[in-house]
Amino acid sequence: MECQYYRENLCHSCATIELPYEQQVAAKENDAHTLLQAYPHVKWLPTATSAQSGFRNKAKFVVGGTADHPTLGTVDYRSGASTDLGQCPLYIEQIEPAVPVLREFIRRAHLTPYDIPKRRGELKNILVTASDDGQLMIRFVLRSKKLLVPIKKNMDWLCQQLPTARVISVNLLREHVALVEGDEEIILTDHQTLPMRVNDMVLHLRPQSFFQTNTSIAEAMYSQAQQWVAEVQPGSLWDLYCGVGGFALHAAEVMEPHAPVTGIEISSEAIASARWTARESSIENLHFSAQDAPEFALSSGSVPEVLIMNPPRRGIGAKLCSWVQDSGIERVIYSSCNAKTLAQDLERMPAYDPVQARVLDMFPNSNHYEVITLLQRRA
């Protein structure tokens, strides 16, 4: 993949960009196979590959420079030097037209970028998420509410220039911390969700709800789990760490109409998104709850016939592993964004063998990938 920022030594986020894509995929497959080599009988399904460029549905711009000459890209946290990466080739094409408009909006509304070393200024980041049909969610991450008035005052201009902007919000990150966003969100538009088509359904994303950055690989991941669920037609299913409900919603589509499906996620924003999609889809056997996943499982007093888990990079941890180990559940689907912690968790659950697994290249040009596994309880 050709990238002027890499060629000019301005950005090194794509650590494996110089490797031919086939070699990138082979290296990830080898890494996954090596980490799960304790299970020689696992059937490895064909890897879900991605386009090398134009796959990221979300742009996370750190705002630098000045209100008159802003940059959208990265900022050195020690020196404050900024690099504009507005034309990054990783973003889907629907994001590109928004970048010059956002620069002009900063100038027009005189939004002062946050100076990290000096700890002054207001505008920290701009987060842009785009659906495949071109609708946008734009979030301005601010230090305080000081810029709320000029942002509102210039909203009409922004919407005229970007008529596909469906959701516009202000997020408040008051602390001087290396985070992308804070907990407070002020939605400025009538629409509160960004519809994101995934396979044959539309997921509704609220501003603080997580969704995978690569839509086509997310589709492959959900479809794979759906296929495994359809094969056994369980009488009940749990989706722990469910996010916006992608796994649960896809599973419910292929289960019996009254078989209960429960999704658990600690983020209330993600749960609100999942419930929105469930209502719109008229799927009645779904129940979503904002709870800590391990706490829910350990205190539930019951078990599902099939369990799906999609934890963060740290994995599910010792307590939940112990619960799964003793649960008696026949089939577990474990989707992991960190094969190292997946391997560690599997060691803690010796009652289960991975019988099928699939690498999903969610992040081309990097060493990161996802792997989804079907675990079968030993007889």
Image (cartoon, grey):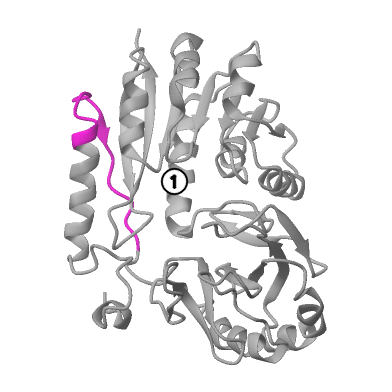
Q: Which residue is mark 1?
A: 221
Where 187 sits versus 106, above or below? above
- Percent of width and height locating residue 303: 59, 15
Where 129 sits versus 278, above or below? below
Q: Residue at x 61, y 83 (%)?
A: 102
Type of residue at label 1? Met
Prevailing SS of the magenta stretch:
loop
- Percent of width and height locating residue 251: 57, 36
> Range of the magenta residues?
34-50
Viewer-nearest residue: 27 or 354: 27
- Percent of width and height locating residue 144: 73, 66
Question: Where does the C terminus fall, quadrant-wise?
Answer: top left
Left or right: residue 2 versus residue 159 is left
Viewer-nearest residue: 161 or 5: 5
Q: Residue at x 45, y 59 (%)?
A: 214
Q: Secondary structure at mark 1?
A: helix
Confirm whether the magenta stretch covers residue 322. no
Q: Quadrant of residue 132?
A: bottom right
